[in-house]
Image (cartoon, grey):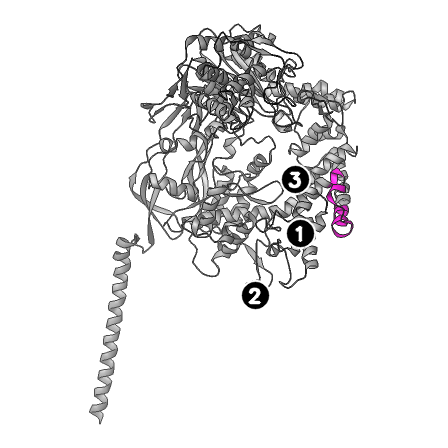
Amino acid sequence: MFSKIKEVVVNFITSRLVMISALLILACAGLIYRLFFLQIVKGETYQDSFQLKIQKEKSIAAARGNIYDRNGNLLAYNQLSNSVMIEDVYESGSGKNAALNETINKTIDIIEKDGDVVDTDFNIQLNSANEFEFTIEDKALLRFLADVYGKSNTNDLKYEERSKTAQEVVEDLCEKFGIGDYTDPNNKKSFVPGMGYTKERQLKLIVIRYKMFSNSYQKYINTTIATNVCDKTVADIMENSNILEGVSIEEDTARVYVDSEYFSQILGYTGKVSDTELAELQAINPSYTSNDTVGKSGIEQSMESVLQGTKGSETVYVDNTGKVIETSSYIDSTAGSNVYLTIDKDLQEACYNIIEQSLAGILISKIENIKFYTMGENSKASDIKIPVYDVFFALFDNHVINLKHMESSDAGSAEMLVHESFLAKQQQVHASLRSELTELNTPYNQLTKEYQVYMSYLANKLYNTGVIDSSKVDKEDKNYIAWTTDETISLSDYIRYCISANWIDVTMLDLESQYVDSQEIFDKIVEFIFEEIEDDDEFNKKFYKYLLQDDLISGNAVCNILLEQGIVELPEEELSQWLAGSESPYTFIINRISNLDITPAQLALDPCTGSMVVTDVNNGDVLALVSYPGYDNNKMANGVDSEYYAKLRSDQSSPLLNYATMQRTAPGSTFKMVSATAGLLEGVIDTGSTITCTGVFDKLDNTNPAHCWIYPRSHGSLDVTGGIRNSCNAFFFEVGYRLSLVGDNYKSDVGLEKLAKYADMYGLSETTGIEITEYDPIVSDLDSTRSAIGQGTNSFTTVGLARYITAVANSGTCYNLTLVKKTSDPDGNLLEEHGATIRNHIDMDSSYWNAIHLGMRQVVEDKDYFNDLAVNVAGKTGTAEESKKRANHALFVCYAPYENPEISIATRIAYGYSSSYAAQITKKALAYYFGLAEADEMQNGTAQELQGGEANAD
């Protein structure tokens, strides 16, 4: 018995010893694994003190190449900077979103407290109405939505996903990343996306979280929160590193643009690569990663492969706090190549300044000390005047005056007085609107003009926010037509009909239950409207127009606000006169515009934009490509400044639009050299042919004949040179008519085809070849007779007209234009010569060229304001009407010297009243180029007076 017990005990002890031995072996194996296997496979190792080391492969960014002008003047370069980065080191689980969002919020607070800005380069932004909106459209928008909703192909998007509004996408991303709060902490289904956050903070969090999510599949890729931060931010981030898990400061480079507003439309800017851009770039160069900085527009984008260098790498070892312990395997990066443009920096800046100063001069000549201007029945576009009260309102309307500052604690006395008037007006309008919506239901066409403006805005608000689902709206419905076209029903009635027709997206409303009746939905829509417009600057600023008109705000108060907000400063003598009351608000404003304290772009009144393109006619180089106004691309690179970007997008002068390459208008009479060429080469006229202008062209319509601009006078008998010299519409009507004849029958399509053929010879049928975004031209497909004078549907960019006039100047060589002169390596060694290529040559008898050139020379000889220019110029004016209620577009194309052409210039002033203004502006540019005027004289920082525009002649 005892032996049996002993045997059992021995066996038990033995088994336990075996088990313990096995556990010891496993423990040793585990230690060996940690010491050796992890070191090899996962890059983790132990120091002698058993401190954990984590191995990371770090990419070393390459310095981006510089951009220079044709003379070696620096336009874009890099400077050392610091960036705030974050790495996703957070444990997965239910608490990850909250912990990560808390850290990001704390980091944003520090960055903004120190005066830096968070990078919000994203395809959704807040507009001035405090609404989320997409900044892209069409295919790019669909690609973005596919990325957001995890679809590899845009075709995989569900209907409801591709139809999402920006607001809905924001809500979806807030929910995905836990940005919001619970109405009931114990109920997970009570989460409300965005709750507890301002829209601005929602956007900043979404941008960072979305980029982190995009980077998540790549190990050890940090995400940028802010770039080019100040030393104070660096110190504060490092000081708080114990509570900012995963946040670090990294050395980086910031892109810097010299004299940015002059070149922003050419150079573009850089920014963090988007998902769509990354896919496209990786197809060419797989080394691109989701945290790379790339060219987003302009030369920065088109020359990305040249400017972007080759990355380096190194192996770094960090401890569990992220501190670098040692480095190894260092491979240096290679800087990108440099790009030299054909642009002449000094010429570009001079032309820009000339346009701005001249626009100011035109404005001054048109502004009158009146409250209203109404066009008479027989008024001409050249007669339009600008009431000074329109100028006062423009200061509010285009955000020159800071509306938010007027309600701040440090507002000046004039600001406070005006803000009190605003609050009273706001209260009155809100009460009236609520009454209209809930009780009165006045049909739209019976409202005052003021309240029509308000009601239209409210309706658009419902569409823009998705409350009225535009995809469901039946535009053939009689109630839709009654609201939009006939204007015979009230907004209230229209909303109620939208509810009954199921055109309302009730998910956009804060409904307590899905089971609600139509009245409850209507009530919620009304409340939604008033919540939305409460802090909507776009809506609120409309009040100022009527406050000014009703004399509830004075021009004196507006001028004082400009002083109180530091927008303008007065010379001491003028300030004394102003304070003494001896200077009127009208004089105050005229002086500010004259001194460019307030620019035409800031006012955004016609005219406020312009473009000019200067080419070398002998090789196709673009010497200047000016778009006014420009913008500061330094605030777009290195992380988009969201506040500045929102201001640019709401600016009514549209500074983000390149007016030289992206604005198309009718060419007016600048097209007549194309028609002359067509007439001569098709044999319907020759240099000896004459056509008699009676002021009327009635071959196609006796009842309503076309008129020459000189009607009721006439030009008499003219040859092709005289037709160009006098810009005779009747002459070119007849040319267009003859081009359209098939036997004795008039066939407009035949004439249009011939005009298109010669427009193509001058390069007007396609883009010019420059390396930045350019809109396609439109060659007329309507009415050959009117198309022959530059009307019909002809529509061209300024750079397109520049290529055309270059070919005219050099007698037939049409170039594919270029902005890039050459590229070099970082040491300045030439890599590649660039240059314009010859597209085609127009083979035309020299006598025909001489006739056209002489006509253009005589155009300029007939302009008195060219008499004092010591270089002979040949040119052609053009005027294009776009709206009966706005001034005409003003155009001028030319080349010089007439005897031996060197440069050509195409100038367009949108809504610039008269082509003579465009011609005088061009004359100033010619004087600068040929050294016939001092630079200081041409660019003295004050408005340039121009001679009165000719009402009709073009």
As drawn, is 721 to the left or to the right of 582?
A: left
Q: Can you tell which quarter of the image residue 834 is in? A: top left
- Read off the residue under disc 1: 528
Q: Are marks 3 and 1 in contact (CB under 8 Å)?
A: no
SS under mark 3: helix
Lower sequence index among marks 3 and 1: 1
How far apart, in angstroms, are the residues tagged by discs 3 and 2? Answer: 38 Å
As drawn, is 228 to the left or to the right of 521?
A: left
Lower sequence index among marks 2 and 1: 2
Residue 796 belongs to the span the image colors magenta: no
How far apart, in angstroms, are the residues tagged by discs 3 and 1? Answer: 17 Å
Q: Is residue 41 above or below residue 143?
A: below
Lower sequence index among marks 3 and 2: 2
Q: Can you tell which quarter of the image residue 696 is in? A: top right
How far apart, in angstroms, are the residues tagged by discs 2 and 1? Answer: 26 Å
x 45%, y 61%: residue:
93
- Read off the residue under disc 2: 187
Q: Which residues are magenta?
A: 430-451
Front position among marks 3 and 2: 3
The residue closer to the viewer here, 711 or 662, is: 711
Q: Are marks 3 and 2 in contact (CB under 8 Å)?
A: no
The residue closer to the viewer here, 486 or 337, is: 486
**Spot occupied by residue 521 in the image (x, y as percentages of width and height):** 67, 57
Q: Is residue 710 above or below residue 110?
A: above
**Spot occupied by residue 806 in the image (x, y as percentages of width and height):** 45, 17
- Read off the residue under disc 3: 538
SS under mark 1: helix
